Image (spheres, rainbow, N blue to C red):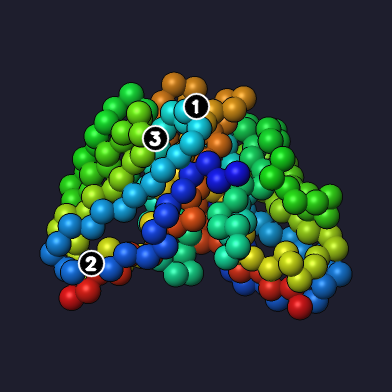
Amino acid sequence: DAGVIQSPRHEVTEMGQEVTLRCKPISGHNSLFWYRQTMMRGLELLIYFNNNVPIDDSGMPEDRFSAKMPNASFSTLKIQPSEPRDSAVYFCASRFYSGTEARPQHFGDGTRLSIL
Amino acid sequence: DQQVKQNSPSLSVQEGRISILNCDYTNSMFDYFLWYKKYPAEGPTFLISISSIKDKNEDGRFTVFLNKSAKHLSLHIVPSQPGDSAVYFCAASVIIQGAQKLVFGQGTRLTINP
């Protein structure tokens, strides 16, 4: 079975440019999560979706960050304009939640973003 | 406000011995706890979990213990193998509006020495 697929794996761009990170969750999963990992703050939740609807975006650092989930099989995280402090590894995760049983989230391999 | 803490950034254990990784939390609303393992350049991989209504869960060489009164959980790996060398993250879960929100610890780097 295919896991969570993220693209690109690596992105290097100059500050001020728009960056778009992509995620394909595991088929059948109904919750999707975007995380950011940095040395200083560790792994922190940015936003999550349930049935394609954003539930909590309180972790999004600034208005420069936005996320969408147009359908159950695709999500994007966009940074516009990008800044050097946005450099981090961004992970996408998904899970199936039935309302009764707790299940783990499954992570993609991440996008390593470097803003010069 | 760090709700989940892993106070040991690193741990070194001899192959064949027991590895014990610890995690403390502050929020009594957490209802489900997980351990993830992470290799370099890969995403975290789910390892084992425990519900807040239990105090122990075992899966092969991996056992997770939960002490709710102390707000403490631990992961035991026995016997430790070289392939267990990785960063281990403890995570705690709370359900908000039908979706699971995970709060992660900072991670512990485990090194198994042959």
Mark 2 residue element: strand
C-alpha separation, residue under disc 1 versus residue under disc 3: 11 Å
Look at label 3 and name its amino acid.
Lys
Sort mark 2 into few (<14), some (14-19) or many (20+) by Cα contacts within 10 Å. some
What x and y, as percent, mark residue A65?
A: 78, 53
Q: Which residue is mark 1?
A: B29
Mark 1 residue element: loop
Establish whether labels 1 and 3 are both on one chain.
Answer: yes
Which chain is indicated by disc 3? Answer: B
Sort mark 3 into few (<14), some (14-19) or many (20+) by Cα contacts within 10 Å. some
Q: How many marks?
A: 3
Mark seen at residue B71: 3
Mark seen at residue B77: none
B65 relative position to A99: left or right? left
Q: Which residue is mark 2?
A: B13
User: Can you say which quadrant of the picture contains the C terminus of chain A?
Assistant: bottom right
Q: Earlier in the sequence, mark 3 or mark 2?
A: 2
What x and y, as percent, mark residue B59?
A: 22, 43
Which chain is indicated by disc 1? Answer: B
Whether residue B99 is visible to the viewer of this picture, yes or no, is yes
The residue at 69%/73% (across/down) is A114
Mark 3 near mark 2, Cβ–Cβ under 8 Å?
Answer: no
The residue at 84%/69% (across/down) is A17
Look at label 2 and name its amino acid.
Val
Which chain is indicated by disc 2? Answer: B
Sort mark 1 into few (<14), some (14-19) or many (20+) by Cα contacts within 10 Å. few
Q: Is residue B70 above or below residue B89?
A: above
Mark 3 residue element: loop
